[in-house]
Amino acid sequence: MLLDIAKLPTVENSAIHLHPADNIAVARVPISAGAALRIDGIGITAREAIPAGHKIALRPISAGEMVLRYGQAIGRAKTPIEPGSHVHTHNLSFEELQLAYEFPAVEIPVPRRQDQPTFLGYVREDGRVGTRNYIAVVAASNCAAHTASLIAESYGEEPLPPGVDGVVALPHGDGCGHAFGPDVDQLRRTLSGVLHHPNVSAAVILGLGCEVNQIDHYMGARGQGPGAGERLAGLTLQASGGTRGALEAARRQIARYIERAAAERRVPAPASKIVLGLNCGGSDSFSGITANPALGHCSDLLAELGGTPVLAETTEIFGAEHLLVRRARNRQVAEKLLSMIAAYKRYLLRFEGSFDDNPSPGNKAGGLTNILEKSLGAVAKGGTSPLIDVYDYAEPVTASGFVFMNTPGYDPVSLTGLAAGGANLIAFTTGRGSAIGFPTVPVLKIASNSGTYARMRDNMDVNAGAIADGEKTVPQVGREIFDLLLDVASGRRTAAERLGHQEFVPWRIGPVM
């Protein structure tokens, strides 16, 4: 809906009341102590200064009473809170809620539209469609990371043929000192996902030669199909004569790959071929009001067409998972989601951690008090479509429709999992401001407020702050994001791409040996 506000603050529009049941409102602009406000016809006076994005009490809240935002509990008042008071970490406590889950009793039907907008992409042999056409140099371990970067950098001043987006490195700090088992399995799943990504025309897997993560694992899997050598080559420094020898050998192989990639052409493809990773980082209180709901509208548009929006960040659905359970296609999918959360909780307990460790200092400065409040805003990125399936980190995403992937909330690790799962586009919302990208996947940045959009203009693609300014509605910005994503899928470069952001960080879950 169009928020009934204008840019200039008035008694009537300085705070946003999100749900009739809420006993707080969110300051749209900084509110000075003593300011008179009228919120949904209720007159209150600010008892203290309230920063933009922070919460102001609308009525008396007793100690121990639940504070509500979005019509949902976000914690209990530590002390009595008077109307007009600032509500934040000093007087609002976190507790793990006992949520009531409404499991689907029957299979939820998935609506589908027949009309299909299109984009121009690269159709691959397996039917997936790339939005970019890269040659990737992937390090099997940290021991090969520097050389992988040198190989990609050697093409920095070298002109490439039209249609070849670049030669990019995916270095990282893992691949050796791992215990065999889930940790190595997850790394291999991640690297396989980026090697065989639809945005990658061909790739080189580069190892040192003696590491835990041997390149034979990748070559064996690829070598079983016809024409295997046409898309993937494997090299080690130890067998190639060291750093310089590996660089020269890789360049000889990449020369053939570039020739092949240059012959590939973009062709019309239906929007149903888009796998859209959904992520948020540097969130603020406006994220759950503007950018995330707008991206949620975009997600619904895509899911209705048979595309695949992929919500991630398990740490940022905690406390809001009941909303996703209610939307699950069937009970099996709902139980799978809850099992991911339970497993993540066990993972945190091994390190004496808590889901509430997630909100960063920047999140709190932006008005988010705890993980419950953050999660309720974060899940809005997933829109309202039925939850079709749930995937573990970096698992290949094969379903059509809205799905979830188990990833950490740490942005570079989450983006890496989404990309490895096959996301050919990523939409990233931010309130405080974030500068991140991915080597082979376009990352579209959506600012939650106009201040961040103006301050970090070079990093941002969409200003969802126009919603809080009263200039646009959530559906209008959601449609703007959707249309822009089609353009990006067809080759338009995002701000992160123009700036050269190429963050790649696999999730290491085990000990260092």
Image (tube, rainbow, N blue to C red):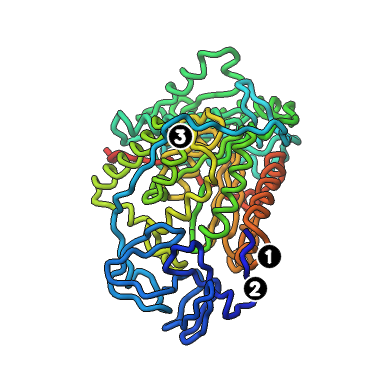
Decide which of 261, 234 is in the foreground and name it: 261
- Looking at the image, which residue sits at the far front? 41
Q: How far is mark 3 from mark 2, CA to CA?
A: 42 Å
**Percent of width and height locating residue 207:** 45, 30
Decide which of 154, 322 is in the foreground and name it: 322
As helix, strand or loop, the secondary structure at mark 2 comes to loop
Residue 460 versus residue 39 in the image, above or below: above
Residue that carries the numbered disc 2 in the rendered image: 7
Mark nearest the camera among 3 and 1 is 1
- Could you tell me if residue 47 is visible in this image? yes
The residue at 36%/43% (across/down) is 101
**182 sits to left or right of 407:** left
**Amino acid type, callout 1:** Glu
Residue that carries the numbered disc 1 in the rendered image: 471
Numbered mark located on residue 314 in the image: none
**Percent of width and height locating residue 9:** 60, 78
* Quadrant for the N terminus in the image: bottom right
Residue that carries the numbered disc 3 in the rendered image: 394
**Amino acid type, callout 2:** Lys
For disc 1, the neighbor class at 10 Å (few under 14, some 14 to 19, many from 20) is: some
Image marks 1 and 2: residues in contact by CB distance under 8 Å: yes
